[in-house]
Image (spheres, rainbow, N blue to C red):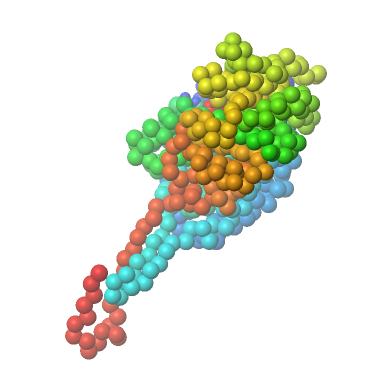
Amino acid sequence: MSTPTVKLLINGEFVESRTTHWKEVINPATQEVLARVPFATPDEIQAAVAAAKAAFQSWRKTPIGARARVFLKLQQLIRDNMADLAATLTAEQGKTLADAEGDVFRGLEVVEHAANIGSLQMGEFVENVGSGIDTYTVLQPLGVCAGITPFNFPAMIPLWMFPMAIVTGNTFILKPSEQDPLVTMKLVKLALDAGIPPGVLNVIHGGEEAVNALCDHPDIKAISFVGSTRVGTHVYQRASLNGKRAQCMMGAKNHAIVLPDANKEQTLNALVGASFGAAGQRCMAISVAVLVGEANDWIPELVAKAKTLKVGAGRDNPDLGPLISCAAKDRVTTLIEKGMEQGARLELDGRQVSVAGYEQGNFVGPTIFSSVKPGMDIYDQEIFGPVLCIVSVNTLDEAIEFINANLNGNGTAIFTQSGAAARRFQQDIEVGQVGVNVPIPVPVPLFSFTGSRASKLGDLGPYGKQVVLFYTQTKTITERWFDDAVTVGKVNTTISL
Ligand code: NAD
């Protein structure tokens, strides 16, 4: 049987690309080739943008209730297809089935939020800003917007983007990760089934060239990107130079402070789950534990807990699955070797893990280093694997200063039973998303994702209230009406601001 090909979506039709450049989509637990994904040609990208531009003319004027109803329907379709979506995601990405359902679910929450657009896209009105003069604002869609997504949440992150862009009246071009586009395409199909009209949502595939084409295209007004800091910085600069709005959510090095008064059992469980879950391939994974004072005595128990985790193929629902690719595995194991060479103490080594029946899988088991310092590659780089670095300090102030000296600002957490310590941390830490006894503080879509510093470029976050402002232009209307019935007989009706 020939390998299936992933289609482009242009003007409501799933079409075969005419490109000669293809990439294989590979199951990271088995190396089975699941599909081939095309790198779209310039003409195909142009056709997708042209379709989105044409569809904008009617979609922007579609009543807000009708737009909302598409997403009410989509949330139901996603629920109905949850098991199939999760199985597809696990096959191409590697994460466990339970995690895959979580990935879909966190995206589903954004779809539910999009269905509330009626109360989110409201303007403001003030009467009598001058005599007889009123001012109001409307939040109008921008036009064609584009989204570029990473491999690690192939359901959640596309769902951060296209529902909110489209429900606010824009049309959209999605460029999924070329490593795992299959679940994204299933979600896109469900979106069409839910009633998204032709041209309103389009999908192109590819890598650097496709992304650059989106950044350069004059008809695209805004770009939302999630991925690495290197690529995100490039996208932000290129899109901004071309006069577009851009928001880029990027790489991370997330620290958790552990104070000795924390609840030991709950804290160690939280650390193990947040460091090694999804094989460390979460932008909000905890990759550095900053142990304060006597909390350093807990290292042996942390290692013992990490040793109990089961590594395996995602479909067997172990604790952690494989890394996305052979290249990712090589990168992580090379960094582990560097950590040893550069003087960190290897407390637990996950390099030799082998999974019966899946000998070819890209597995790395939980790995823990202590005595980690800035200047070591394992500290300075985002490893994006199941590797936890332990740093030892003496005080809370030292811990806060240490974290603030790191360039990244995606997520952080503190474990303590002291309200005063938690409050100081929350006020003084320069990181966008803060957890207090919560290891992975990703906000629900009533709020927005709020990474900061080197983890984010652009002012407004994806999803939530902020993204309504990102995907709309505020127009201010100042209005005066002459009422003849009122002014009859009056000689001088002067209105001034
Ligand atoms: P990546 O930057 O390699 O890829 C992201 C997207 O950019 C993909 O669609 C890819 O095709 C495209 N791309 C790759 N190379 C490119 C290039 N040279 N020029 C233009 N486009 C290019 O990221 P990834 O490996 O898929 O994802 C992992 C990264 O994403 C990690 O750094 C992780 O922290 C980050 N991430 C951040 C968040 C967040 O919200 N801050 C969320 C998830 C993932």
Which quadrant, please, contains the N terminus? top right
Residue 260 sits in which quadrant?
top right
Left or right position of 316 against 11? right
Which quadrant, please, contains the C terminus? bottom left
- Image coords of residue 355 (percent x, y): 78, 19
Say which residue appears at 62% left-offset and 12% top-offset.
Answer: 340
- Image coords of residue 439 (percent x, y): 65, 38
Say which residue appears at 71% left-offset and 21% top-offset.
Answer: 365
- Image coords of residue 170 (percent x, y): 47, 49
Give the mark count.
0
Residue 361 sits in which quadrant?
top right
Q: Residue furthest right?
A: 356
Say which residue appears at 38% left-offset and 69% top-offset.
Answer: 126
> Closer to the camera, 419 or 96?
419
Q: Is residue 302 visible?
A: yes
Check the image and report above or below for 362 versus 446. Answer: above
> Closer to the camera, 479 or 383?
383
Q: Residue furthest bottom?
A: 489
Left or right position of 388 against 424? right
- Image coords of residue 35 (percent x, y): 64, 26
Check the image and report above or below for 123 versus 76. Answer: below
Q: Is residue 16 visible?
A: no
Say which residue appears at 71% left-offset and 44% top-offset.
Answer: 81
Check the image and report above or below for 124 versus 56. Answer: below
Q: Residue furthest top?
A: 341
